[in-house]
Image (cartoon, grey):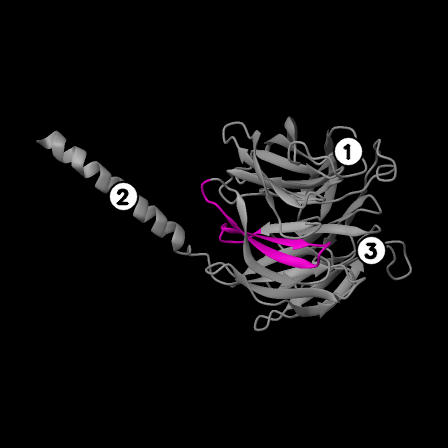
Amino acid sequence: MTDTLAALARPVLVVALAVLAAAALASPPANAAPVTVYIGTYTDGTSRGIYRLTFDAATGTMTEPVLAVETKNPSFLALHPSGRFLYAVGEVSSFEGAKTGAVSAFAVDPKTGDLALLNQQSSEGAGPCHLVVDKTGRNALVANYGGGTVAVLPIGEDGRLKPASSVRVHEGSGPTKGRQEKPHAHGIYLDAAERFAFSPDLGADRVFVYRFDAAKGTLEPHGAAPLDPGAGPRHLAFHPSGRYLYTINELLSTVSAFAYDAAKGALAPLQTVSALPPGFSGTSWTAEVEVSRDGRFVYGSNRGDDSLAVFAVDAATGRLTPAGHAPVGGKNPRHFTIDPSGRFILAGHQGSGTIAVLRLDPATGLPALTAATVKLDKPVCLLPVPAR
């Protein structure tokens, strides 16, 4: 009799668990409050600077973008840990009469989200394209594509930038004519402990590693991890565990996985996989790479195929298994970001002048386009900022 009752109870239990799981997926998580998203743009068209919109993770919808501040070519953005200041590269080749770009500091209006210029400093190289702010809020680190340099700009208590305290010049080249005759620093990143900084260099086919001292604002050479010849490493992302690092390689449309020894600041290559669908024969370049909040998936954007590549992560080894591709909803997806709730991807399409929302399947990790789309000319960076 007991066995019979248990057998009858099992289907009821399965149904109940399924209902609970469905309810959990349907109800928004605690961090699904609306967020401000700042958008960096290229201003050689109709865009005029940094824009902002509100994204609601409870509904997956966006408001129309509005101008937060007018500034030239703010192609990448970073927020101060206090939330009071925002920093942007000015991706230009001349600033105050010198062959260099600029980095701008802005104060954030806590009521409106609008930005007010505080000051600007030289980026110490032409064509700055990426920057980060350290956890202490004392330094902005910037990568200069045209100059092939990386630099540290100290930040004052008032949020203003000071002249560079450290500048490093990359060396090296690659086999791709027209793109790799010289170094092109394409990013600058810090590990979780912020003891080491990493700069993927598209021209040199290397990830340069530096020891970083936040108190002194210095970068000291610590080696480099090589990529395949002609790979063109562009951006990178750390796994939430801190044990793995992934680079997206623009010129060969690949993703490379590395094991990371945080104590030594050392990278060990694991594998390299294609970011393109099997059989693809057109022209395409990769752009951005992100790791899901739970560390189970890696995403990379393809400009040309106009898709997001999805890879499943082996938690024990960090290696990647291709899991599929999803249309991104526009042309030339230069940048995308996972929203703070971890349930959506926001993708900016430089080619079609649109921003789209994709919903992530929690089981498969695959993104699916939603109806949410807004227009903005040449979006190139999306920065979600949760309410404080």
Write down the quadrant of residue 231 in the picture.
top right
Q: Is residue 158 visible?
A: no
Q: Residue at x 60, y 51 (%)?
A: 337
Confirm whether the magenta stretch covers residue 339: yes
| Res. 254 mark | none
- N-terminal of the pair, mark 2 or mark 1, is 2
- Between 92 and 160, the residue placed more toward the observer is 92
Q: Give, as a three-letter code, the residue at label 3.
A: Gly
- Between 327 and 163, the residue placed more toward the observer is 327
Q: Is residue 351 visible?
A: yes
Which residue extends farthest right? 97
User: In screen coordinates, is 122 left or right of 17?
Assistant: right
Comparing labels 3 and 2, the label whose residue is closer to the camera: 2
Seen in the picture, residue 39 relative to 242 is either above or below; the reply is: below
| Res. 101 mark | 3
Residue 274 location (% of width, % of height): 66, 32
Seen in the picture, residue 372 relative to 184 is either above or below; the reply is: below
Confirm whether the magenta stretch covers residue 155: no
Query: Which residue was labeled with disc 2?
Result: 15
Query: Which residue was labeled with disc 1?
Result: 205
- Between 276 and 78, the residue placed more toward the observer is 276
User: In screen coordinates, is 87 left or right of 147?
Assistant: left
Residue 105 location (% of width, % of height): 71, 63
Q: Give, as a three-letter code, the residue at label 2.
A: Val
User: In screen coordinates, is 374 left or right of 253?
Assistant: left
- N-terminal of the pair, mark 3 or mark 2, is 2
**Magenta part of the protein: which range?**
338-363
Seen in the picture, residue 234 relative to 348 is either above or below; the reply is: above
Q: Residue at x 74, y 65 (%)?
A: 47
Bin the neighbour count of mark 3 within 10 Å (Cα to Cα): few under 14, some 14-19, many 20 and up.
many
Bin the neighbour count of mark 1 within 10 Å (Cα to Cα): few under 14, some 14-19, many 20 and up.
many
Q: Give, as a three-letter code, the residue at label 1.
A: Asp
